[in-house]
Amino acid sequence: MRTPLLFIAVVGVFCPSATLAAQTPVEQRITALIARMTLAEKLGQLNLPTYDPSANQADLARRGLAGGFLNLVGPDATRDMQKTAVEQSRLHIPLLLGLDVIHGYRTTFPIPLAEASAWDPGLAEATAKSAAREARAGGINWTFAPMVDIARDPRWGRIAEGSGEDPYLGSVLAAARVRGFQTYIMATAKHFAAYGGAEAGREYNTVDVSERTMREVYLPPFKAAVDAGVGSLMSAFNEIAGVPSSANPWLTNTVLRHEWGFNGFVVSDYTSIAELKAHGIAASLTDAGRQALTAGVDMDMVASIYVDSLPALVRAGKIPMTVVDEAVRRILRAKFRLGLFDDPYRAMPPVDPDTALARRAARESIVLLKNDSSLLPIASTVKSIAVIGPLAADTVDPLGPWAGLGRPGDVVSVLGGIKQRVPSGVMVLTAAGTGVTDGDTTGIANAVATAQQADLTVLVLGEADSMSGEASSRAWPNFPGAQERLEQAIVATGKPVVLVVMSGRPLILSWSAEHVPAIVQTWFLGDQAGHAIADVLFGDVNPSGRLPVTFPRSVGQIPIYYAEKSTGRPAAPGQHYTSKYLDMPNSPLYPFGYGLSYTTFAYRDLKVHNTALHGTDTLVVSVTVTNAGTRAGTDVAQLYVRDDVGSVTRPLRQLKGFQRVELGPGASQTVEFRVPVQQLGLWNQAMKYVVEPGTFHVYAGSSSTADLAGTFEVVSRP
Ligand code: BGC
């Protein structure tokens, strides 16, 4: 067995003009290989077809016309294809074998947005590592993950695949997931860039954000992935201010390669190169290919334009050979780094599913949104429980979107989890009431009758797994079908109701927040969903999840996020001409960072240890957290910073640190945050990153609305 792959910089930064003698041995081997390649073989390395069992794709591998495949799975099929490439092709170049291992290969962990609710980079690294280990045993050497797109619009279905709205949390988790995946296979940070900024939350839609917003909000998680050594990036489907991301030299060449020094490769998203025609910047597929390649998109996923249409352009001198060679070099470099030239198969024996890790991840991902009169955990006086709702007994939807090779047969439903956990003598009744998406209300009466027979109802509502993920935007993110009717009818019984929400996005929960005493946000938790939910409902686990994204009161508030600006007329009660709505508050239903526990936490003694800082200093802030209740619990202590006056406007708050703090009843801990002053900068009017002298506020507590505050001053630039 090989030791886990480490993405160490074995080749150094490639400089096209470097002489052969100045190159590292690996770069010299790449140079020699490129010198032996025909143009067709070069463009073949840049071609990534999707596996098609009806086509003779072994022939592509044999002729060196594919650099890899996506969606070819299983140890035997991947081995056969790899064997063809390395034994029968002229130059014996191994293949990249890629798959969307997003939140699991066979063992399915919570969707990334759920896992982001744990605010636990160690957990994110562990699940990515476990998924990569399984994938590698299945013959995969490359995943199209992590998805690091910042998303502030719950209408967008792919919000499910990322870490939510915040660039700091997103960056920490991006780096953790890259480390986890790359223990065994190569990772891809996607979708470069600003895909989550789609107008109106509509999939694939136009993005028009300023360079400052790009640099402050959308790009940091990509930078973090690059700094963590990610092997590849995927270009996005969307345009940014008129320039599609799959043919955007500023993004790919200027920022990614030049500024950040990235020397891995960029793969297009699916047919995004062909789509340059529909975007209206290319008159033909050939021209689309030319634009993408010269903009720095090295590998053409699915569209087959590079290999089919570019040879004539290269021969005619319309694309310099140096551009082709450079792209080929990046692909070959990735293959060397993966170790494929030494051992193309990189086989590892299969492993048993890590159900313990999947259960831990699912537990940590659950966010308790409301718990009036301590309805949860379920009291021992409850002798009968009705588990109601279309998702109650479901074993398909908890897998969530992009569930890889996950199987419903591995999933524990909420009903299954509760049935296994209830104390003996407690009766469990069940009724679906409605379907997930259809409008049929005929089952509601039976569901109501069932609820009436029980002491307490666990009502499991939400979305189908296919309602989030790609091409799954929703203009109205509510409980679909007849579920709201069911909810109202169950609440009208007057029995205590615990609402368990399954979704790939924040849903609009305003009615529920007003009428249902307890609400548990569970997202899509994967295989162990039912067990993890039962663990929380019965109090075996004290919920510790915190929202990685703001929950709006209404669709009309979208986009809504905590790191907003002041405006020139901040909302002021009773003052008409201020920035607010006539028909609802500006505040969200549940803010970023929010989540309840079965205990309560108190914050005191916020100390800023160095109140006059120089540019190279590190800000040190401490705060004491006390578990003021009677149960052990975990809080996520959060630190926010505000730059009081800048040369450009600043967000009212920005997350700059967080720590999970586990405390027994009555226990206290002093948490210390360390923030390098260098991280308190801004992109000024000349679009230079600078730390500006001036005063700042810090806030610490258990959500983005934390009010314990302190101040400090940056007295000189770095
Ligand atoms: C998605 C990518 C994914 C690719 C390959 C595309 O449609 O946007 O995220 O990696 O398909 O499956």
Image (cartoon, rainbow, N blue to C red):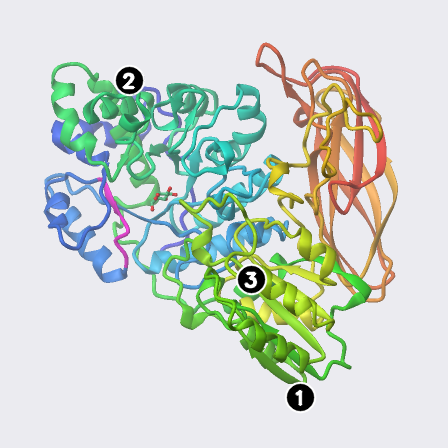
State which quadrant residue 269 falls in. top left
Q: Is residue 464 above or below residue 647?
A: below
Above/below status of 159 relative to 609 = below
Q: Nearer the viewer, mark 2 or mark 3?
A: 3
Which label is found at residue 19?
2
Q: Nearer the viewer, residue 576 or 4?
A: 576
Mark 1 or 2, nearer chain start:
2
Distance, label 1 to label 3, CA atoms, is 31 Å
- Whole-angstrom CA distance, mark 2 to mark 3, is 67 Å
| Residue 350 on image: x %, y % | 36, 66
Indicate whether residue 484 is drawn in magenta.
no
Residue found 62% across the figure and 79% down from its top: 449
Ligand 1 has an atom within 8 Å of the beta carbon of the residue at disc 2: no
Q: Nearer the viewer, mark 1 or mark 2?
A: 1
Taking the image as shown, residue 351 lies to the left or right of residue 384, namely: left
* Residue linked to disc 1: 424
**Quarter of the figure with the C terminus:** top right
Residue 182 on image: x %, y %: 43, 47
Amino acid under disc 3 = Gln
Q: Residue furthest right?
A: 605
Q: Which secondary structure, mark 1?
A: loop
Q: Amino acid at mark 1?
A: Ser
Please give the range of residues in magenta.
67-73
Quadrant placement of the N terminus? bottom left
Question: Could you tell me the amino acid type at mark 2?
Answer: Thr
Q: Is residue 68 magenta?
A: yes
**Residue 483 bears which disc, if any?**
3
- Crowd tier of the residue under label 1, counting other residues whose Cα lies within 10 Å: few below 14, some 14–19, many 20 or above: few
